Amino acid sequence: MRPISTSFNGLLIIGAIAVVAMVGVTLGRAGRNIRLDAFLSRLQDTTAEIRVRIAVAVLIGFVALAGR
């Protein structure tokens, strides 16, 4: 079995940084969305606890990504 080349590792790191940047930009834009903010604020203190559910979903996504 051949080892992965260092240029491929560099591309993976650049890809990961690009994904993190895109997620940051998307979350930044979502934070300025008034309708989304009102919706999340309305659900955050109910039994839905929407922000906790979103955080858990993101965590599961990162675990699945790390597993690959």
Image (spheres, rainbow, N blue to C red):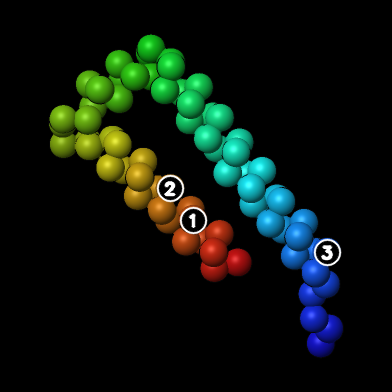
Vertical position of residue 16 compared to residue 39: above or below: below
Q: Circle 2: is it few (<14), some (14-19), or many (20+) Cα within 10 Å?
A: few
Residue lying furthest top: 34
Q: Which residue is mark 2?
A: 58
Decide which of tag 3 and tag 1 comes sooner along the chain.
3
Say whether marks 2 and 1 touch (CB < 8 Å): yes
* Drawn side of residue 3 relative to residue 13, left or right: right
Three-letter code for the amino acid on which mark 1 is drawn: Phe
Identify the residue shown where x is 40% and y is 48%: 57
The residue at the point 43 percent across, 15 percent down is 33
The numbered disc on residue 7 is 3
Query: Residue 10, which numbered label?
Result: none
Rendered view: 28 above or below 17: above
Q: CA distance from mark 3 to mark 1?
A: 24 Å
Closer to the eye: label 3 or 1: 3
| Residue 39 pos. (x, y %) | 31, 20
Residue at the extreme bottom of the image, as rendered: 1
Cα gap from disc 2 to disc 1, whole angstroms:
6 Å
Type of the residue with mark 2: Val
Give the foreground label among 2 and 3: 3
Q: Residue 7's x, y, as percent?
A: 83, 64
Crowd rating for badge 1 (residues with CA inside 10 Å; few <14, some 14–19, many 20+): few
Task: Give the x, y percent position of residue 9.
Answer: 75, 65
Residue 67, horizontal then vertical, whole percent? 54, 68
What SS does tag 1 mark? Answer: helix
SS for tag 2?
helix
In the rendered image, the quadrant that contains the C terminus is bottom right
Q: Residue at x 60, y 38 (%)?
A: 21
Q: Which residue is mark 1?
A: 62
Helix, strand or loop at mark 3: helix
User: Where 21 falls versus 8 (above or below)?
Assistant: above
